[in-house]
Every structure is written in structure tokens, then in C-alpha cells.
Image: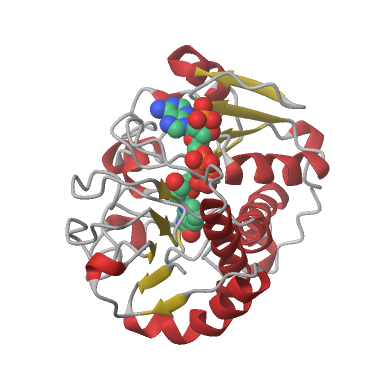
Amino acid sequence: MPNILFAALTEAWADYETHLRTALDAQGLDYTLATDLPPEGVDYMIYAPNSTVQDFSPFTRLKAVMNLWAGVERVVKNDTLTVPLTRMVDDEGLTQGMVEWVTGHTLRHHLGMDAHIVNPDRTWDDTPPPLSKDRPVTILGMGALGQACAAALGQLGFPVTGWSRSPKSLPFRTTHGADGLREALTGAQIVILLLPDTPATANTLNAETLALPAPGAVILNPGRGPLIDDDALLAALDANIGHATLDTFRTEPLPRDHPFWSHPRVTVTPHIASTTRPDSAARVIAANIARAERGETLHHLVDRASGY
Ligand code: NAP
């Protein structure tokens, strides 16, 4: 009978407990689930990186840690964690939310909605927006979220290019590696960042790479703040970049005096692009615990060496 510790902020327990019990029961598991268990008796840990657990060494029987978040940068370098770590991949919840945020903000810029929503001079400019087929979109990061967003934007007619670390065969243009980044960014009109925060992805958008997209290009960053060199972005907004819609930042909440808040062509959203939804996330976690109990390999394993 596995002992499962829920190690997240105390207030999250009320959101998750019923969903977790329902999902674990549906897997036919006999278990103990609690927010407080003797460390040496814990088999699985459902974990949020902002929990009080930062030292995993007392958890001597631990078989796996299930991260409630997609991003693992705050736990992946923890040397006291020596058992398998999984990250959150949840098509029904987390992924669907990201698809909606990315599609919404892409269409905002594609259709030039701002000019009609705020039009104090009552200007009658009847220039139609281009069709999606004439708006190349590049997505940096072709993982669970990047691929789902690419599929949704492709469905709407946008020509999508996807960039990743390893080569991919997908039903749209893909590139990979350092050379592939230049190729993917050159001429892009909308650039969407869905990369993890690792040493290798820091400042992926910098002074050199920000010069590659088309004049007036829009940057959407629902990935992580360190993917962009902030100063280079502010400079690029005076050159070829038309707008940046940013959901993630190096420091969160974004400090009130940060120039992004007051820049007329920067939109700040407060890290709400997507979040873990307790009902569907509970099913993902319960299914993975059931796999482990059957001796099967866990889904959504983090590769500790590459940091995601
Ligand atoms: P994922 O499935 O792990 O995909 C990551 C993608 O990035 C993969 O395609 C990977 O390439 C690529 N990549 C990693 N390092 C790279 C490098 N050095 N060069 C080029 N490509 C690289 O992750 P995901 O589930 O899609 O999530 C992506 C990120 O979204 C998360 O890490 C998190 O930071 C962010 N996120 C944000 C929010 C929000 O609310 N703002 C919510 C959820 C997630 P390979 O395919 O070759 O491995």
C-alpha cells in the first residue's frame, strides 16, 4: 500500500484532495494520501517547487516525485533528489489552457484588434488584416505545449515553423539546433517561446537573434523569463520588434518599476498563460503512480542532465 505525500502549499490541498482521492480510487489503488507523513515511510511525493520540502534526503523509501508544474527548473538541480522526477503534462488542462492563451494573443496581434478596441479618434481605417496564411509564426520549443499550440495555429491556417533541440518530423516546417534557430526566426512575424528554463536556453532571444524576425514582429513569451535578454528586447522594440506580450519574467511578480510595465508596446500578463488544473492533473498523477506500482516506466520523466 503506497504512502503518498502531498507536498505543495497548504492552500492547494483543498483544491486537490478530493480530485486525487477520486483519481487514485479509479486506478484501483489502496493507498494513504496526506500532507504530513513520516519521511522514511513516503513512497511517492506529489510536489510543487514552492513547498516547504527542499531536502529530499530524509525520504529514504521514496520511489518517485511527481511535479505539479510543467517547469522543473526549481527542482531539477536539487542534489538531494535522487529518484525519478516527472513533470506535469496534462492535455485536458495545462495544455488546453496554453493553447487558448497562445491562440488568443496570436489572433489579437494578427487581426490588429487593439486599433479597434481603443480608438479615441473614431478613425475609420478599413484596411483588412491579412489572412493567416500570410502570417508566418515560429514556435521555439516543440514539446507538449509547443506542439499543441502549433497544431491549433496550423488549424487556423498560420504557416508554423517549430524549433527544438533534437530533429523532429511533424506535419509542418521544423528546424533544430543553433543553425536551425536562425532559420526559424528569420522573417517570422510572430515568435512564441515555449522552451524550458535551462542553462542552454538562457537568452535564446538576445540582440543578435531579436534582429532576425520580420519588421513589426510580435514576441509572445509564455515560456520563462530568462529565455529573453530584457535589455536586448527593449532595444529591439525601438528597431524591428513591434510588440511583446510577456507572461513570464526573470523576477515574478514583475517589479513595479520594471520598464516593461510602462512600455506602450509591451503587454504584461501575470504568469497566467496556463496553470495546472486539479481535476485533470489528479488523473495524470494517479495514472503515473499506478504505472509505477505495476513496475512500468513513468510517463513524463525529466531528463536531469538536460534540465527538462
Ligand atoms: P517539454 O515538453 O519539455 O518541451 C520542451 C521543448 O523545448 C522541447 O521541444 C525541447 O526540445 C525544447 N528545448 C529544450 N532545450 C532546448 C534547446 N537548448 N534548444 C532548442 N530547443 C530546446 O515542455 P512543455 O511541457 O512543452 O513546456 C515548455 C515550458 O513552458 C515549460 O518548461 C515551462 O517553462 C513553460 N510553461 C509556462 C506556463 C505559463 O503559465 N506561463 C505554463 C506551463 C508551462 P526536444 O524536443 O528536442 O527535447
Does residue 244 appear left or right of residue 79 in this picture? right
Does residue 38 appear left or right of residue 181 in this picture? left
Total numbered labels: 0
Residue 59, by quadrant, is: bottom left
Which residue corresponds to the image point at 38% horizontal and 73% vertical from the top-left? Answer: 6
- Is residue 244 at least partly visible in the picture? no
Q: Determine whether 178 is above or below 171 in the image.
A: above
Q: Residue furthest toward the front?
A: 1
Q: Looking at the picture, how far across and down is residue 52, in whole percent?
A: 22, 71
Asked whether 61 or 160 is in front, the reply is 61
Q: Looking at the picture, how far across and down is residue 171, in whole percent?
A: 77, 27
Q: Determine whether 286 is above or below 15 in the image.
A: above
Does residue 105 appear left or right of residue 171 in this picture? left
Q: Looking at the picture, how far across and down is residue 73, in whole percent?
A: 32, 47
Does residue 22 appear left or right of residue 166 in this picture? right
Asked whether 130 or 36 is in front, the reply is 36
Q: Looking at the picture, how far across and down is residue 68, in whole percent?
A: 45, 62
- Is residue 47 at least partly visible in the picture? yes
